[in-house]
Structure formats: structure tokens, C-alpha cells
Amino acid sequence: MPGVFNLSVDHAVAAAKEAYGLGVKSLILFGLPDTKDAAGTSAWDPNGPVCTALKAIKDAQPELVLAADVCLCEYTDHGHCGPLERDARGHVTVANDQTLPLLARAAIAYAQAGADLIAPSDMMDGRIGAIRRALDERHLDDIAILAYAVKFASGFYGPFREAAQSAPKEGDRKSYQMDPANLREARREARLDLEEGADMIMVKPAMAYLDVIREVKAMSDRPVACYNVSGEYAMLKAAAQNGWIDEQRVGLEILLGMKRAGADVILTYSALDAARWLA
Ligand SMILES: [Zn+2]
């Protein structure tokens, strides 16, 4: 997508400094490992791209708040968010309970490397509690958890999956991501993550789910984030490049809509553009 690149660690440090200089206070890191396997073991490699970049960026710009995305789909060779198992009927499915300690292991590695926020995006049941306990046991009590609490099975993730090479090789994520039609499930998922100890909760995607942001904001006593995802950014850029819309005007209007709906934090590919427009 225009303006979006996979960065090596040295370039990530330069990008982080530029972002901070423009007024962006927080970044989230996603990893693209050299090798992938069935369990996603490179997710917690202390010499992997995310741990290395967290250390390098913290050294270069200590004031930046760093979040680390925690999921296994970038690290598994099958592209699902956890290791697979065959159920009693012979169906291949993600092994929810086997995934939890692996996510916790990745979370500890990122926290030890310098992440201030751990952001689990996998949607396995029970992962917030498992990660919280694992961090606390290692005296990482003050590392916060930003839970992707309400994550819909959405067509808007297409460009990210291509960039992260994380599209499932077989099947889809509908057994662990949510039905876009189901608002009551959104409430339940948010409640469970809050009960398990999430410090912030996220709704993803954002543009077609502003009502969900509002709903979650009303029930949460903690900050609410939304994820303005790759497909949303792609539509803005493509329309602007075709001369069909005014990019700055529409780009800021989209972010304003998310704020108005109740988002305290917006995770967006438009962050650098928006910082420049607002300056
Ligand atoms: Zn995933």
C-alpha cells in the first residue's frame, strides 16, 4: 500500500524517531520472521525482529510508548493464530488451550525486550488471563495489556495479510473471530477480557463498526481503542489517488468519527499523515 513498508530494524528505528518528531506518541510492532513452523516458535525468539526492534527503538527514543502485537499467525507455516489439532470428528481446528502458554511466552519475550503494552490479537478464549498471570509471575506487573477484545472476521484485513504473509493456507478464522452481524457477542467478548484483566480493549475493524465502539465504550471503565485496519486505509488511498475524494478532509473525518464514537486511542496506518495534517 502507498506509504506502508516492511522495515528492517535500522529503518524501524529511523521511522520511530520520525514519528515521535511528528507528535506520534505510541507505536505497535508486528514481526516478519525468517522461518515459520507449525507452532510459531519464532514468535518468542529474543533475536527475532520484534524483540530486536523493541530494544533498538527503546534505546533510541525512550519516550515512545511501544506496543507489541501478540499472535502466532505471522509465525506459523499454516497461517492460523495457534497450533492446529484434529477434533473428534476429524476437523482441523486451532488448539485453543495449547495456544495460551505459547502466547504467554511471546508476551514475556516482548515485555523483557522493552514493550510497554502487550497487544494480543489472536482471540483465543482465556488468553488475557493467561498472559496477565505469566507477566505477573515474572515481576512484569506494570506491563499493560491492550486486548483485541472485539475482533470481527472481516474482509478489511486483506492488505495486511498479504504484507505479513499471514493468510491461512487452508480454512478461515471464523471459529475464533466474530460474526460481523453479532453485537451481543461483542459485549460478551469485551466483558470477558475486562474480567480477565485487560487494561485497554480494542474494537477491530473500526469504520464499519462505530456502533460497536460506542457500545463497548459505554460498558468499559478502561480506555477503548479501535483499529483503523489496512483495508480501510487502502480505500482512502485508492480513492484519493483516483482524484475521487479529498484525502486530508476525508482522512481526518474518518478519524474524527472514531473519536466521536468513543475511541480513546486509534491504531491507524494514517498516523503519520494525520500528524502532518494536524501540524
Ligand atoms: Zn493471528
Image (tube, rainbow, N blue to C red):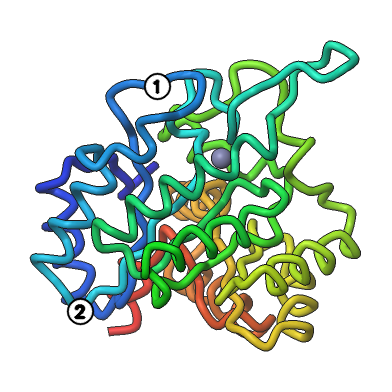
Q: Position of residue 224 (x, y in %)?
A: 61, 77
User: In front: 132, or 29?
Assistant: 132
Quadrant where the image shows the N terminus:
top left
Q: Residue at x 45, y 72 (%)?
A: 144
Q: Mark 2 falls on what kind of element?
A: loop
Disc 2/disc 1 C-alpha distance (Å) = 33 Å
Q: Residue at x 69, y 31 (%)?
A: 95
For the residues bearing labels 2 and 1, Cβ distance under 8 angstroms = no
Mark 2, residue position: 63
Task: Tell me the quarter of the picture where residue 113 sits.
Answer: bottom left
Quadrant where the image shows the C terminus:
bottom left
User: In front: 75, or 109?
Assistant: 109
Q: Using residue 93 as the reference point, say whether residue 72 is left or right of it.
A: left
Crowd tier of the residue under label 1, counting other residues whose Cα lies within 10 Å: few below 14, some 14–19, many 20 or above: some
Q: Residue at x 40, y 30 (%)?
A: 41
Q: Position of residue 154 (x, y in %)?
A: 70, 44
Q: Which mark is residue 259?
A: none
Q: Residue at x 61, y 60 (%)?
A: 128
Q: Which mark is residue 36?
A: 1
For ligand 1, the image quadrant comes to top right
In the image, residue 163 above or below residue 226: above
Q: Using residue 24 as the reference point, say whether residue 179 is left or right of it.
A: right
Q: Position of residue 273 (x, y in %)?
A: 33, 67
In the image, residue 237 above or below residue 207: above
